[in-house]
Image (spheres, grey):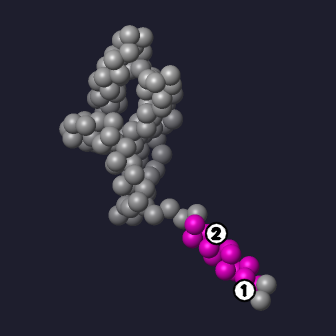
Amino acid sequence: MKKTFSVLIAALTLTACSVDPQAAATRRATLVQSVFLNPADQQGLDLAFPLESGGVYKTIEIGFFPDEVTEPEVRRRVAAFCAGQASPRLTGQAAIKKDLGVSNRTQADGSVRPVHFIFYTCV
């Protein structure tokens, strides 16, 4: 009985830890759409996660597909996001705060694509 219970608990734990790729892709797409309202600005982005500080979104993590969009184009989009913050402390420009590099991300269809992750800061 104890062995059966242990196996059941282990199976439930593994199931709870598994990530549904479709659900994850949907969450990431929702974040991108909430940050970049223009569909053209959403093209090539995998993740857009703004971080709030003092009521202003001064830092934003972006994940983009380097085969679809260039880093300078992503920075231009982030600068437009920064300009929309309407804070007198910000100039409406964006700079790289930390480049996390490229890693592979499993897509909802099971394919694997390289995604470049960068933290930008609004200046």
Q: Is residue 6 on the magenta stretch?
A: yes
Identify the image quadrant of the N terminus: bottom right
The part of the chain drawn in magenta is 3-16
Residue type at numbered disc 2: Thr
Name the spot of residue 71 as percent of width and height, x first. 35, 30
Residue at 42 percent across and 11 percent down: it is 89
Question: Marks 2 and 1: in contact by CB < 8 Å?
Answer: no
Q: Residue at x 38, y 55 (%)?
A: 25
Name the spot of residue 94 as percent of width and height, x first.
38, 20
| Residue where numbered disc 1 is placed | 4
Mark nearer the N terminus (1 vs 2): 1
Could you give the CA–CA distance between mark 1 and mark 2, rounded to whole angstroms? 14 Å
Q: Residue 36's quadrant in the figure? A: top left
User: Is residue 97 something one can see in this rendering?
Assistant: no
Q: Main secondary structure of the magenta part?
A: helix
Q: Is residue 22 in sight in this rendering? A: yes
Say whether residue 96 is magenta. no
Q: Which residue is mark 2?
A: 13
